[in-house]
Image (cartoon, helix red, strand yellow):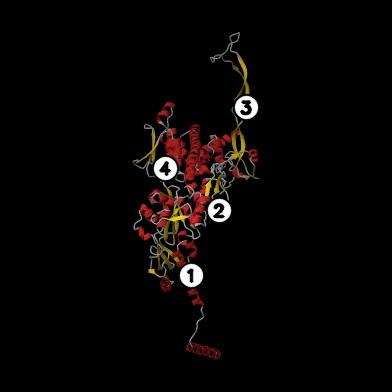
Amino acid sequence: MNRENNFEEIQPIPSATIPLPVAGKDMNSILKSLETGVENIFTGDKYAQYLQTMSKFHRYSFNNTLLIAMQRPDATLVTGYRNWQSMGKQVKKGEKGITILAPAPIKRKREQEILDQNRKPLLDADGKPRTEEVEVVIPRFKPTTVFDISQTDGEPIETLAPEELTEAVADYDLFMEAITAVSPVPIRFDEIAGEAKGYYHSGDKEIVIQKGMSESQTIKTAIHETGHARLHDKDIMEKQGIEKDRLTKEVEAESVAYCVCSAFGVDTSEYSFPYIAGWSSNRDMKELKASMDIIRKTAGEMIDELSDNLQELFAEKKQLLESEQKQKLIPAMEAAGYHFDELESTDGNLRFLPDGTHEIGGVMISDSWNDVKEWLEGVVLEDPDTAERVARVMHPERYEKTSEELMFAGEERYALYQLNTESKDVPYEFMGMDFVKDHGMEVTAADYKCVYSGILHDSVSLDELYSIFNQNHPADFKGHSMSVSDVVIVNRDGDMKAYYVDSFGFADLPDFVRQRQEMLGIESPESHLNMGEKSSCISFYVAECSEFPVLGEFHQDLTLEQAFELFDKIPGSRMNGIKSIGFNLQDGSDYEGMFDLYVGRTLQKDIINSIPGYRDNKLVQKAISDAEKIIEKRQAEREKPEIKKPEELQKEKKTRSQHRREAMSL
């Protein structure tokens, strides 16, 4: 059950570092390269490529994002040579670095006027402003070299998004909830006239998205319109004195959406920017840089806010799921024979203690409730009773009848009943049968409730049941220890009987079974008092196609011998499928119906016995045994040497003599 959740380091396909357009690592050369880069990103497919780089380096300045995109567009994580060494990684020999700009502020001393508390200059004796020497920091930048993680060797590092975030992004409802949280206005869904997928209404302060779109398209539209709401609100733009044409607004919103979708792995193949060259052609360098910086800043803020919201929402959902799992999985583990040790359990260290009934190993320790679920789903339990009890908790929809009802339907099971004192006082509680008789009382099923029911194994007696429910309670048993006044019903070989737990031993309760049947609404209770072969039957069928028995030749309501005879008569050349012999079980259980017994030339014994309802059914087991005998007999007949008649031997002898004469004449 142990499983580690590590950060996943995704290494891109290695590529070479592209030289900058203007050679040289001085500031003038780099600035000229940046000018060329700004012009080039608005041509061809380079704009989308630049936005992809921006999505990965949204905390970097516009200049450095552009420099990385120009030199190594597939970069995912960059830092200096020494920093990589400090993280246990080494830059590969021969790798060429990426040139970016690093802050290199300089300090200068200068004279500065001294101001009073009202921000007015203090004057000296001559009436001149007093000054003092102060140190000021002047921003400067210098070229520096960094390397991408793909250019290094070494151990993986915990730097990229944890797998929880990836899981959260894959959850559509969770992702939409996070987008709604970062949107400055409400988001609603409606029918939109025309071809628009969504819009932001500045007057109503809301985002409207077209109903019925795919999850991917809905997410893209929601992010696009959130970009409009954050950047292009009419009232805010008027207050700030900002004016933008319609195309500029679309470029900014679509670019933000592309960056955010790219950062979270949402499909961006449908995005295209054919209009970007025309939009940028009549704008100067300063205006273009300003728009790119707005896109970078807005996309970066949305990426960070979405990441925080997704992680928080995912943590809440995970906690809720764990709580729901815990409520369901503890009863399932109890059905498997384990008590949950809540006092000694912590997150990542769940402890389960075995009960004394089931023959299982020692203490079980699990990392998470999800691991517990996986174990329960995949565990192979030898005890069919335990396997069924686990399945009833995990998948109750698979069972139409309770275990007690299956007992009344003819299966060999038992049920334990204890007095229902919650609804009324019962005077004979914990009293022996002598007390009941002496006081003229009657033990009736109406006073009881079923507290446990299970499969009755051949070796289990009433005394053993008493021992189990006194000394080694099953983990999923919630009643009190089996005591005087409890009732046990057992169905063995179709014979159902009820027993009162007396002071010493057990006393018969002749009418209790009928009373309980009436309480359960079972019709004709007398027909169930002796259920053996009367309520259960099995017949056989032959099908030309085992997968679809009604396709092609099909015979039913046969004996097993008849089935094998008809099986031989179906030609093997038929193309409808593999011919088969099957059984049709009619016993009122969940396993009632048709099932393959003999397919092709193979008896399906292992498959049949892997199903508890067939493994424990006497009719099915007899069918397997009879089939084995028929198959063995048929095999012996095929291997038996052929005994020829005298006239056949004489004819064969003449034929051999003729062959010898013909050979000699040649």
- Please name whichever residue, 12 or 93, is drawn nearer the observer in this view of the structure: 12
**Does residue 152 appear in the picture of this structure?**
yes
Q: Which residue is mark 3?
A: 106
Judged left or right of residue 468, residue 149 is: right
Asked whether the beta carbons under mark 4 and mark 2 sit within 8 Å of each other, the answer is no
Question: For mark 1, does the 10 Å Cα neighbourhood hold few (<14), some (14 to 19), or many (20 or more) residues?
Answer: some
Q: Which residue is mark 4?
A: 218
Residue 428 horizontal/vertical position (percent): 42, 48
Secondary structure of the residue carrying tag 4 is helix
The kind of residue on which mark 4 rests is Thr
Question: For mark 3, does the 10 Å Cα neighbourhood hold few (<14), some (14 to 19), or many (20 or more) residues?
Answer: few
Residue 447 horizontal/vertical position (percent): 39, 48
Q: Nearer the viewer, mark 4 or mark 2?
A: 2
Q: Which mark is residue 360?
A: 2
Distance Cα–Cα, label 4 vs label 2: 51 Å
The kind of residue on which mark 2 rests is Ile
Distance Cα–Cα, label 2 vs label 3: 74 Å
The kind of residue on which mark 3 rests is Ile
Residue 591 horizontal/vertical position (percent): 42, 59
Asked whether the beta carbons under mark 2 and mark 3 sit within 8 Å of each other, the answer is no
The kind of residue on which mark 1 rests is Glu
| Circle nearer the N terminus (1, 4) | 4
Please state, as top left, top right, bottom left or bottom right, where the C terminus lies in the image.
bottom right
| Circle nearer the N terminus (2, 3) | 3
| Circle nearer the N terminus (1, 2) | 2
Q: Which residue is mark 1?
A: 628
Secondary structure of the residue carrying tag 2 is loop
Q: Residue furthest top?
A: 125
Q: Nearer the viewer, mark 3 or mark 4?
A: 4
